[in-house]
Image (cartoon, rainbow, N blue to C red):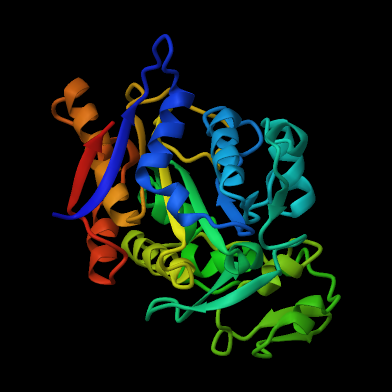
Amino acid sequence: MGGEVFFVNFEGTRGDSVLDKLKRLCNHAGLNKIIEEGDLVAIKLHFGELGNTRMLRPQFLKIIIQLVKERGGHPFLTDCNTLFYRGRFNAVCHLETANFNGYDQAAMGAPLIIADGLKGLDYRLARAREGLSEVKVGSAIYEADKLVVVTHFKGHDDVGFGGIIKNLGMGAIARPGKQAIHSHMKPVVETSLCNGCGKCVEVCKVKAIAIEEGKAFIEQGNCNNCGDCLVICPRKAIPVNWARDDKDMQRKLVESCAAVLANKKGRAFFVSFLVDITAFCDCRSWSPLPIIHDIGILAGTDPLAIEQASYDLVDMHIKAVYPEKALHDFTGVNGLYMLEYAETIGLGSREYQLIKL
């Protein structure tokens, strides 16, 4: 039979707005059964990069916040800092960007907490699988009593699509932990920028870094690619290495997502919005036109069932407009492998019952 996936379309009518539908969807899908009195509830979302205009509207999150509060929960909106240096690479910039994009605490009725702290070094280690061994989960997400994952499903030019797996597998991971997911290559010091301050030496837990002739040097054989040195360097002299293998990154994302959810069994709820579906993720500082029209909202407690249903619905609507095309024709990467691998490691079921409300 597969997991239950509840669905509402994105057409508002007189007396039944999309916000009304979202509230009904969450209640039918079981959000009210997840939240208990006194729970600290992390609502994981993507605040959108500075300059992006396709991220989720704050009104949607206000509805979810209200529903959590009605059950006696204490919600907070959260995300982790980014690996790249734009508008969200530390908590100060991140909160400023979130506020600019409409996610203001006074307006939302819930605090905003950057899960991995000021510079991305506030994390808890969670056991992962062979590709990663362990992941660095933002502390606020790891320690939350309950987790509500609110996802904007869209294309992604690194892994094929950005959905729940990307939202948690990358988005819930502290800044230094993102390096190992993005690339199998270890960091190298840009000596022209290094002043030999030694902060990277202090933070390296495996003692792979030394100061030689006034410059930091990373011994590749000892480096475990943890990424802490990238984050701590005040001169950005240890740049992100973006070299990757698509399937390697997809595997690591899935493993990372599973690790994030490991301590949330029976304590997580998922909402996915199939709206403003572009070929690129909300990490871009600009937004292209959507490739198809808005579809609807999905919710439930099986993340993989929702992810598969989202993928299927988007592909179906693409083919209705472009009969010879699929989502990967717009992104350049086939994301189906992530769904296949996710099922093999027990993230959920790819079989699902789509229940239209």
In the displayed structure, does residue 276 sit left or right of residue 39? left
Between 192 and 314, the residue placed more toward the observer is 314
How many dots with numbers?
A: 0
Q: In which quarter of the image is the N terminus?
A: bottom left
In the displayed structure, does residue 70 sit left or right of residue 167? right
- Please provide percent x and percent y for residue 31: 45, 48
Between 211 and 155, the residue placed more toward the observer is 155
- Please provide percent x and percent y for residue 261: 45, 66
Residue 298 location, quadrant: top left
Q: Is residue 329 above or below residue 81?
A: above
Q: Can residue 299 be seen in this view?
A: no
Q: In this view, does 180 lie above or below 102?
A: below
Q: Is residue 36 visible?
A: yes
- Residue in the picture at 58% in, 89% down: 222
Between 79 and 306, the residue placed more toward the observer is 306
Of all residues shown, which one is farthest toward the top? 14
- Please provide percent x and percent y for residue 68: 57, 46
- Residue in the picture at 47% in, 41% down: 281
- Residue in the picture at 28% in, 31% down: 357
In the displayed structure, does residue 286 sit left or right of residue 17? right
- Please provide percent x and percent y for residue 13: 39, 12
- Residue in the picture at 32% in, 24% down: 292
Between 145 and 52, the residue placed more toward the observer is 145
Residue 138 location, quadrant: bottom right
